[in-house]
Amino acid sequence: MKYYIIDYGKDTVDIAEAIVDCLRAKGHHVVIYITNLSESVYCQEVSEDEFLNHFAPTNKNEQN
């Protein structure tokens, strides 16, 4: 199992969603950020600890 951070803009939603779907289909974990750089797509494999540093704040925001 691997951990990824995906950051993308409004003009790259289709590409980013395809990446996310592929990673999740392989059982990997993903944290998603939306950037103000409309044509940007950023995907980085990170350690579990780094992933959890990103996951905890995003998960908390989703529960509120």
Image: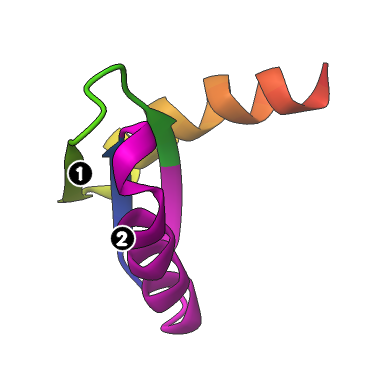
Residue with the most extreme bottom position: 26
The disc at residue 15 is: 2
**Res. 29 image quadrant:** bottom left
Q: Which residue is mark 1?
A: 41
For the residue labelled by badge 1, is the local secondary structure a helix, a strand or a loop?
strand
Residues at circles 2 and 1 in contact by the CB criterion of under 8 Å: yes
Residue with the most extreme front position: 11
Residue at the (64%, 30%) spot, across then down: 59
Count how many numbered circles sit on residues in the image: 2
**Res. 10 image quadrant:** top left
Position of 37 compared to 34: left or right?
Answer: left
Comparing 9 with 29, the one in front is: 9
Residue at the (43%, 60%) spot, across then down: 17
In this view, 38 is above or below 14 = above
Comparing 4 with 56, the one in front is: 4
Residue segment shown in magenta: 9-31
Position of 43 compared to 21: left or right?
Answer: left
Residue 51 drawn at (x, y percent): 35, 40
Residue 48 drawn at (x, y percent): 32, 48
Comparing 1 with 63, the one in front is: 63
In the picture, the quarter occupied by the N terminus is bottom left
- What amino acid type should be assigned to the residue bearing mark 1? Val
Residue at the (43%, 40%) spot, across then down: 32
